[in-house]
Each structure stands twice: as structure tokens, then as C-alpha cells.
């Protein structure tokens, strides 16, 4: 296509035209995928417009990543009661999205809507990096609405095993695991016995190694992502997630504790 156009203009003009056509085609494909996602997931499809309205921000269209999920994956997500959400790390004006900023920006409107508080008490972590600086990862994510079955009343190590089992037996049931997930599970399988021993002798070191496992990095949310998702889902659909449950994240406090988020009732999330 590029060669055919050189005769009618400069190479630079032809290159720009080719790029513009590719961008148009990609945008058309993206729009089709978004329409499909909305058809399959309904209110559980939370794209750019939903995030902008809920968080009162503007998102640059150029920053929105491509849809990574196939029709089959979206239909499987529907069966597993998952929702699709676009996460961004900054506004169109370059403002970072942190837990602290979300609270400051949205609390007034939250109260006016009769939704109560966003955070319960922040005194214990108001200076923590996960609250003041950490941002969501720029991505589309499929997220379970509740904690996964069989993962409650377990320590972090056993929960990681529950995540591996859930991926194999539910999310990718009857299919080969994608390479990234398989490698992450293999890494965990090799490390879990040593981690179990380490938990008895040095919990802080064990927590650090558990949080850094690729399986937990791939599947667990950051604290800011839990709050981001919670706010977008509640404001869009008038439905609270993690109202009486907590989810352990892949972040640590400055003291080494693994951060959990939940109990997100009208008194505020803990």
C-alpha cells in the first residue's frame, strides 16, 4: 500500500496516510470488540466512559490499550461472574491516580449520593507508598466480583495454591493454560515447600517472596486497584463489592505486612 501511494505524493505523506489507515482499522476492530463485550457482559463491561464518569476524570483515547480478550474469554468471564474494567494510571492531564487522590477527589460527591465514606480510617497507612504513590497498572482486567471459592480462612501461601487451582479448574477448564500462567504456576510449585518453612522462621522474608511470585503479581490486585474497581463498579451499577469480605493484595506495608482491602460498607473500606 505504501509503494502504491508514493506516485501521488511524498514518501512522508504516504507513510502518514498508511499509519492513519492502520489506526482507523485498529479503532474499528476495537469498537467491534467493545460492542461485543457490552453485549456479553452488559453492566459488567466498564470501559472508558464508565471510568471517566465514575472517577470524574478525563482519559486520553490514545492511552486506552487494545482489548486483550477474545469472545470465548469474555463469555467464560460471564459464566464465572466476572466484570471487565479498564484501569488507567493517570488522567488525560497527567495526574497520577492514587488511593489518596481518589479519596480527596471523590469523597464529597460520594457523601452527597448517600454512599457514606470511601475509607474507614486512614491514620494507620496515610503515609504508606501504596496509599500515596502507587498507581493502577494500565490494562484491561477481568475481575471476580467476590473472593474466589475455597480461598477464605487460608494463609497467603494456601490462597496462592487456591488461585492456581482456580485458574486450572475454572478459568481455563478444558484448555491449555497460557504460557505465562503455566510458568507462574510452575515457579510457585517449585517454591511452595521452601516458602512454607520460611513462614515459620522469617515471616517478613516469606511475605516478600510470596508477594513477588509471578502468580501473585499476575492475579492479585494492588490496593489502589481494589479501591479503583470498587468505586467504578459501585458508582456505575449501584452495587457494592467486598462489602463484608476482604481481599489480600500483592502489596506490602513499610513494616512488611501484606496489605488487605475490603469491608467496604457505608463506614468506609478498611
Image (spheres, grey):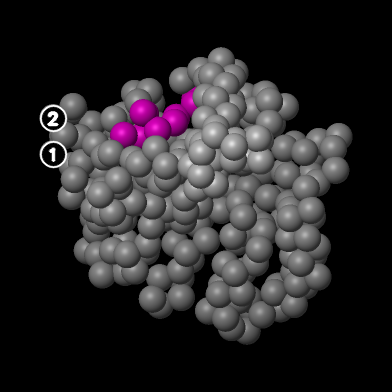
Left or right for 165, reference 110: right
Q: Residue at x 47, y 64 (%)?
A: 251
What residue did someone put label 1 on? Answer: 108
The picture places residue 6, in percent across and down from the top left corner, at 59, 40
Q: Residue at x 68, y 31 (%)?
A: 70
Relative depth, front residue between 267 and 214? 214
Q: Residue at x 57, y 67 (%)?
A: 211
| Occupied quadrant, residue 61 | top left
| Occupied quadrant, residue 182 | bottom right
Magenta part of the chain: 44-52
Residue at the extreme bottom of the image, as rendered? 201
Left or right for 86, reference 219: left
Left or right for 205, reference 93: right
Residue 46 falls within the magenta-colored stretch: yes
Left or right for 251, reference 232: right
Q: Residue at x 79, y 53 (%)?
A: 179
Query: Mostly what secondary structure, the magenta segment?
Result: helix
Element on which disc 1 rests: helix
Q: Which mark is residue 175?
A: none
| Mark 2 vs 1: CB contact within 8 A | yes
Q: Disc 2 to disc 1, how far (Cα)?
A: 6 Å
What residue did someone put label 2 on? Answer: 112
Residue 140 in view: no
The picture places residue 150, in percent across and down from the top left corner, at 67, 43
Amino acid at each position: 500500500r505504501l509503494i502504491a501511494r508514493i506516485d501521488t505524493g511524498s514518501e512522508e505523506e504516504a507513510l502518514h496516510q498508511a499509519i492513519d489507515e492502520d489506526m482507523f482499522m485498529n479503532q474499528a476492530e476495537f469498537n467491534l470488540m467493545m460492542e461485543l463485550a457490552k453485549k456479553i457482559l452488559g453492566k459488567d463491561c466498564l470501559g472508558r466512559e464508565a471510568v471517566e464518569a465514575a472517577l470524574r476524570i478525563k482519559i486520553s483515547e490514545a492511552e486506552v490499550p487494545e482489548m486483550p480478550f477474545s469472545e470465548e474469554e469474555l463469555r467464560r468471564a460471564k459464566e464465572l461472574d466476572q466484570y471487565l474494567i479498564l484501569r488507567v494510571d493517570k488522567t488525560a492531564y497527567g495526574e497520577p491516580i492514587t488511593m489518596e487522590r481518589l479519596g480527596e477527589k471523590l469523597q464529597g460527591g460520594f457523601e452527597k449520593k448517600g454512599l457514606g465514606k470511601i475509607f474507614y480510617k486512614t491514620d494507620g497507612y496515610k503515609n504508606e507508598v501504596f496509599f500515596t504513590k502507587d498507581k493502577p497498572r494500565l490494562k484491561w482486567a477481568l475481575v471476580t466480583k467476590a473472593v474466589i471459592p475455597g480461598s477464605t480462612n487460608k494463609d497467603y501461601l494456601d490462597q496462592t495454591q487456591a488461585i492456581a487451582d482456580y485458574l486450572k479448574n475454572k478459568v481455563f477448564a478444558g484448555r491449555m493454560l497460557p504460557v505465562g500462567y503455566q510458568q507462574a504456576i510452575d515457579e510457585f510449585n517449585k517454591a511452595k515447600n521452601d516458602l512454607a518453612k520460611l513462614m515459620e522462621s522469617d515471616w517478613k522474608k516469606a511475605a516478600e517472596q510470596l508477594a513477588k511470585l509471578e502468580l501473585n503479581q499476575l492475579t492479585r490486585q494492588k490496593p489502589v486497584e481494589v479501591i479503583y474497581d470498587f468505586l467504578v463498579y459501585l458508582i456505575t451499577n449501584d452495587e457494592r463489592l467486598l462489602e463484608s469480605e476482604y481481599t489480600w493484595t500483592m502489596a506490602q506495608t513499610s513494616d512488611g505486612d501484606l496489605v488487605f482491602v475490603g469491608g467496604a460498607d457505608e463506614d468506609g473500606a478498611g
